[in-house]
Image (cartoon, rainbow, N blue to C red):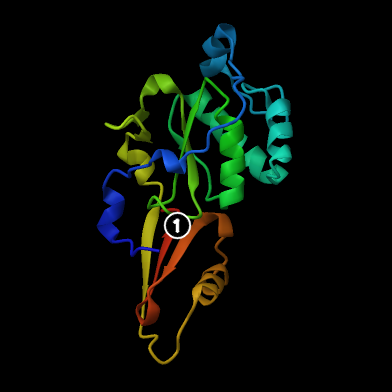
Amino acid sequence: HPIVRPNALCRPLDWTRRGRVRSPLSQKWVVSSRDRASISRSGTNNSHGGGILPRQDLMKAAIKHEVPREVAVHVLDIAEKAIRNRSMEVTDFLRAPERIGMMMVIEKLAIVKVLPFGGYPQAERQKLAFAIPELGLLSADEEGHDSLATSGVREAVALVELRGNFLFDAANHRDFLGAILGLGIEREKIGDIIVLGDRGAQVLCTPEL
């Protein structure tokens, strides 16, 4: 892992096509114009069906991609929130298999766009950002690749530096993770942990921590 400098999170992140997962399915689920018009009036959020999105079909697809049910429900809830509120919304940190599986499911939708981000392009644990296309919050960069077009989503990941002298008492990834979880912090709020040898570590996390 490269060292993540604190000011690196203040710059637009360059997400390349290599970070995207293209679905092998050509079918796109499209929300009807009647449903689109009612999005802003909708006040319910059914985690298992009957909402803005075809939840039952999406849940089946997610399970087929071996995404845990609770993770799929969380991601679809966030996607529907972005559509309903016409805003940018982000998930918790996801493991790579969960992120890839859900992107293969969500990318079939025409009503919402999704992009992964985790503080730096090669991050293993990443969040998913959702926004409807009309808002232009997720846009194409100069090379035609989708990129994050607002600083708001970049601010959804914070960097914490854990400093100390570990020259004679080395600490590894498991040590730092165990210490963090021992504070009662949920794993989903923690992204990558980059160990810096005897200087400590850098932790990507949810800002409210």
Q: Which residue is mark 1?
A: 205
Kindly state the secondary structure of the residue where label 1 is placed. strand
Q: Nearer the viewer, residue 194 or 122?
A: 122
Tell me which residue sits at (43%, 28%) in the image. 87
Q: Nearer the viewer, residue 99 or 151?
A: 99
Which residue is farthest bottom?
168
Q: Quadrant of residue 188?
A: bottom right
Q: Is residue 79 above or below residue 37?
A: below
Tell me which residue sits at (69%, 41%) in the image. 65
Q: Look at label 1 and name its amino acid.
A: Cys
Say whether residue 51 is left or right of residue 150: right
Say whether residue 105 is left or right of residue 59: left
- Rate crowding at label 1 as few (under 14), some (14 to 19) or many (20 or more) other CA atoms within 10 Å: many
Q: Position of residue 100 (x, y in %)?
A: 57, 43
Say whether residue 207 is left or right of residue 91: left
Q: Position of residue 25 (x, y in %)?
A: 62, 26
Tell me which residue sits at (56%, 45%) in the image. 99
**Does the image show residue 138?**
yes
Say which quadrant the C terminus sits in.
bottom left
**Does the image show residue 47?**
no
Numbered marks: total: 1
Q: Position of residue 177 (x, y in %)?
A: 53, 70
Say which quadrant the N terminus sits in.
bottom left
Q: Nearer the viewer, residue 22 or 38?
A: 22
Q: Is residue 87 above or below residue 199?
A: above
